Amino acid sequence: MFATARRGINAYSNIGIETDVANADPHKLILMLYDGALCALIDAKRQIAQRNIAAKGQAISKAIAIIESGLRASLDIKAGGALGERLAALYDYMCTRLLEANLRNTPEHIDEVSRLLGELRGAWAQIRPAVATNEPALTPEALAAAALRRV
């Protein structure tokens, strides 16, 4: 009975996430990527504490996939210039640290990446989309500069 209830809750949660993604603007989608990566890292630390190696690896892999295929892939390095390159390098560094955390079971590495992602997420959350505020759109350079100032 509990397994059936859990599947129902998970299905309901997935529908909610899919609906949020379908209705989100690009700014909100980036916030959702940060949140997803941070949740995966919380799960990875829990799995390390429980000595569940397979689940730890899955959680870290999920965080890496979000960082690489979501956050880093969404960068327009050409438009962002040097700041975009610095942010891309930071994402690469985070993925390297997570690979090390996976190999060595080091929650400290996960904490470091969580802190960096949290800072970037906080900076991104303070940037309001031009549509919502009726202000002129920010350039990619301004967005990257605001995010990197917080790190």
Image: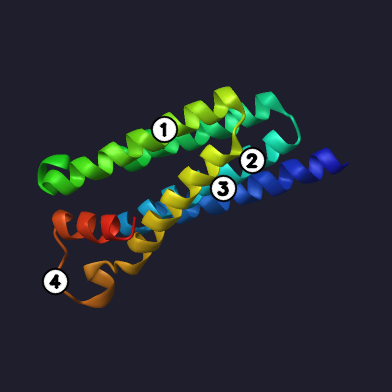
Q: Quadrant of residue 110?
A: top right
Mark 3 sits on what residue? 39
Q: Is residue 126 visible?
A: yes
Q: Percent x, y for residue 4?
A: 80, 40
Identity, as a three-letter code, of the amino acid under mark 2: Lys
Residue 136 image label: 4
Q: Is residue 75 visible?
A: no
Q: Residue at 63% of width from left, 31% of height from top?
A: 56
Q: Nearer the viewer, mark 2 or mark 3?
A: 2
Residue 45 image label: 2
Identity, as a three-letter code, of the amino acid under mark 1: Cys
Labels 3 and 4 touching (C-beta < 8 A): no
Image quarter of the N terminus:
top right
Mark 3 burial class by Cα count in 10 Å: few <14, some 14-19, many 20+: some
Q: Quadrant of residue 87?
A: top left
Identity, as a three-letter code, of the amino acid under mark 4: Pro
Mark 2 burial class by Cα count in 10 Å: few <14, some 14-19, many 20+: many
Q: Residue at 37% of width from left, 64% of height from top?
A: 125
Q: Nearer the viewer, mark 3 or mark 4?
A: 3
Residue 2 higher or lower than 119, as above or below: above
Please report whichever mark, 2 or 4, sits nearer to the chain's N-terminal start.
Answer: 2
Identity, as a three-letter code, of the amino acid under mark 3: Cys
Q: Nearer the viewer, residue 110 or 72?
A: 110
Q: Nearer the viewer, mark 2 or mark 4?
A: 2
Q: Residue at 42% of width from left, 48% of height from top?
A: 33
Mark 1 burial class by Cα count in 10 Å: few <14, some 14-19, many 20+: many
Mark 1 sits on what residue? 95
Separation of residues labelled 2 and 4 (CA atoms) = 41 Å
Q: Nearer the viewer, mark 1 or mark 3?
A: 1
